[in-house]
Amino acid sequence: MNFESLCVIGMGYIGLPTASIFADNGLHVFGMDINKTIVTGLNAGELHIFEPGLRGLVLDAIASGRLSISTNVVPADAFIIAVPTPFYEDKSADLRAVISAAESIVPHLKRGNLVILESTSPPHTTTGVLVPILEKSGLKAGEDFLLAYSPERVLPGRILRELVDNPRVIGGVNRASAKAGRDLYRKFVKGDIILTDATTAEMVKLMENTSRDINIAIANEFAKLAEKFDVDIWEAISIANLHPRIEILQPGVGVGGHCISVDPWFLVEAAPEATQLIKTARQVNDAQPEFVAKLIEQAAGGLQGKKVAILGLSFKPNVDDLRESPAVELARLITNAGAEVYAYEPFKEDAAIEEIVHVGKLEDALNDADMVVLAVAHDQFKDIEPDQIRELTPAEFVFDAVGAWDKISWEKAGFQFSGLARKY
Ligand code: SAJ
């Protein structure tokens, strides 16, 4: 099938790069977002998200006339839904954005169109939720129009490269739909394109993120054991990983972001009787900020009245995304323990977070601190020289929650150094 025009619904971390790459590869792309501020900003060349290389790509696509962004869904040969699927308080999937995106397509849907859902969704969302909505158009899915699920699987921080190079799964409601999806994504995807059915593709995505969550949970549990047995977890993991069939991930402050800390719950909700391990792993990772906060409290000999500089608030290194961030949770817990927290997040200097004083400069976090906590291993923090920090702060204690700093150098610079399961 040949596609000339495309409407991408949702201009977030996935929709915006996807729309821009399609435009860069010759399609006429209409980007749509319900948020007027985001749309106005993008049209003025201001991106609401940071991702390496994205700004230039978006600006070029707009300047070329092949990408236009508005608050309206418009008729096109194909539609991609790339909206968030968060969860409710009770951890059940909140599909409101997916549902309203599908509803907004209905008036524009024509015979021969292709609709793709990219948002991570519980099993059966494509067949059970999207089909009935889209068929309100009077057209039949798989016959009059084509419908597929194709999960995004890119890593924040490497989105532009991974969109092109990663293998892509396309699950159609029938074979013709999957093949049409392949024709669309072939415009830019260099990795393998694997065709399957829609529910398998939904499961694949959830299995990937769930298995990563479980692997991080075991690393976090190993860190707890290492604390108990006075072992340096970073050394222990590096030795264990020399085994040819072992690849233990890194412990840390916990698991955040909009994907891994959310997606496993979709499986737990869909099949509570079959997901004990998945649920426990989620609970282990959710409890990690509290575990780390206790270690920090011990290291500081109590937090009441202490001034604590927290370096990093994003959910992982080198990104600006604060969603579900365990570092933010850690900052809150330290505040609740009686400390005055000054947090610095270089990728989001203007972040406003309830209960936490967020400063725009590293110096402002450090200049009065009793303790410095490294919560996110941003490259620029990893490269910090302890001697330089010594000049900027009177702090006595340093706590490295992410295994990034060299204990001996910090001690040489006159700090009392400790960290998550650190001995060396
Ligand atoms: N983390 C650890 N230890 C590790 C690795 C990660 O504590 O060894 C933490 C991170 O700090 C972060 C969280 O886990 O808080 C998740 O980070 P991540 O880098 O593992 O993953 P995300 O959420 O940025 O992206 C994941 C990716 N999924 C997999 O690697 C299986 C990505 O490919 C998906 O596209 C993305 O979820 C998504 O959108 O679903």
Image (cartoon, grey):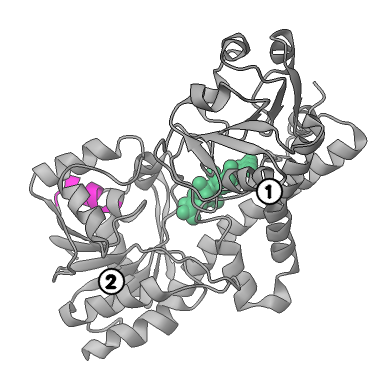
Q: The residue tagged with tag 1: helix, strand or loop?
A: helix
Say the numbered circle drawn on residue 105: none
Q: Position of residue 321 (x, y in %)?
A: 45, 45
Q: Tell which of 399 and 318 is nearer to you.
A: 399
Taking the view exactly as shown, the residue that stands out farthest to the left is: 65
Q: Which residue is mark 1?
A: 336
Q: Determine whether the residue tagged by mark 2 lies in a helix, strand or loop.
A: strand
- Viewer-proximal residue, 68 or 129? 68
Report the Cα–Cα distance between label 2 and label 1. 47 Å
| For residue 101, above or below residue 349 | below
User: Which residue in the rendered view is the most extreme toward the right?
Assistant: 229
Residue 375 horizontal/vertical position (percent): 61, 35
**Residue 31 at x, y percent in the picture:** 20, 58
Q: Is residue 70 magenta?
A: no
What residue appears at the point 68 percent right and 29 percent down from the top-left corner? 400
> Looking at this view, is 251 or 79 the one in front?
251
- Which amino acid lies under the numbered mark 1 shown in the image of this protein? Asn
Q: Is residue 110 visible?
A: no
Q: Which residue is label 2 attached to? A: 115
Find the magenta span and give its range.
18-26
Q: Is residue 294 left or right of residue 148?
A: right
The correct choice, above or below, for 377 with respect to 291 in the image is above
Name which residue type carries label 2: Val
